[in-house]
Image (cartoon, grey):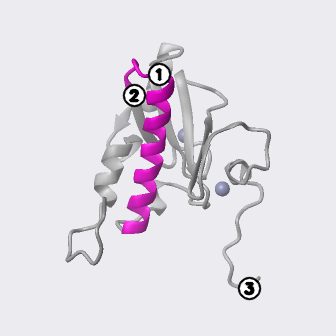
């Protein structure tokens, strides 16, 4: 279709989001799906991805739609970690390009400790590079306050 945004069929995360792989989904709704990282770095390591193909955090904007999506991804991640590893310290965040692995936005949800321990270096926050905590990203894309036309939770 002319003008339609092509979803890369080679994108493994699009395939997972459309349930076209054997990957077991821990959660799915019409906006996001969650599954286990195939190469876990912690005792629990889940990924939450949007169903829609959004390449990286750099493609997110300070707008209601993006904020709501990331907030939802984070809520789903927290819910799964609380269910499966309630006593662990949890970390949720994103790799910023160029240090991201797959070019389909994915939230890393980690229940510590890291396994093995040196894996923690993959999740260092280094400001504008490296890993960005979900909370910090949400602050960056939180829509600027204006006269609300509808109530937001
Ligand atoms: Zn994709
Ligand atoms: Zn990643």
Q: Choose mark 2 or mark 1, whichever is in front.
A: 1
Instruction: Please state which of residues 95 and 74 is positioned toward the viewer in this rendering.
Output: 74
Residue bounds of the magenta highlight: 64-90
State the mark number for residue 12. Answer: none
Q: Determine the CA span between mark 2 and mark 3.
A: 44 Å
Rendered position, 150 above or below 62:
below
Number of numbered markers: 3
Circles 2 and 1: CB distance less than 8 Å? yes
Answer whether residue 65 is magenta in the image.
yes
Q: Determine the CA span between mark 3 and mark 1.
A: 47 Å
Instruction: Please state which of residues 30 and 123 is positioned toward the viewer in this rendering.
Output: 30
Circles 3 and 1: CB distance less than 8 Å? no
What crowding class fits label 1: few (fewer than 14 Cα within 10 Å), some (14-19), or many (20 or more)?
Answer: some
Q: Choose mark 3 or mark 1, whichever is in front.
A: 1
State the mark number for residue 85. Answer: 1
**Circle 2 residue:** 90
Callout 1 secondary element: loop
Q: Main secondary structure of the magenta part?
A: helix
Answer whether residue 71 is magenta in the image.
yes
Q: Give the quadrant of residue 39.
A: top right
Regarding ligand 2, which quadrant of the image does it lie in? top right
Asked whether mark 2 and ligand 2 are closer than 8 Å, the reply comes as: no
| Residue 95 seen by the camera | no
**Circle 3 residue:** 2
State which tag comes first along the sequence, 2 or 1: 1
Circles 2 and 3: CB distance less than 8 Å? no
Q: Position of residue 36 (x, y in %)?
A: 62, 32
Which residue is depicted at the point 24% across and 68% down?
144
Task: Name the side, left or right, on which 23 lies relative to 54.
Answer: right
């Amino acid at each position: 279709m002319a003008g339609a945004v092509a979803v890369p069929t080679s994108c493994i995360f699009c395939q997972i989001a459309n349930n076209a792989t054997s990957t077991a989904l821990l959660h799915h709704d019409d906006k996001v799906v969650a599954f286990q990282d195939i190469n876990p770095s912690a005792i629990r390591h889940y990924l939450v991805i949007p169903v829609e193909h959004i390449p990286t955090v750099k493609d997110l904007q300070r707008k209601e739609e993006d904020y709501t999506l990331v907030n939802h991804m984070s809520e789903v991640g927290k819910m799964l970690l609380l269910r499966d590893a309630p006593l662990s310290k949890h970390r949720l965040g994103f790799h910023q390009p160029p240090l991201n692995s797959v070019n389909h936005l994915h939230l890393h949800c980690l229940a510590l400790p890291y396994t093995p321990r040196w894996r923690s270096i993959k999740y260092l926050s280094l400001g504008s590079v490296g890993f960005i905590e979900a909370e910090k990203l949400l602050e960056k894309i939180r829509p600027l306050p204006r006269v609300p036309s509808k109530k937001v939770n």
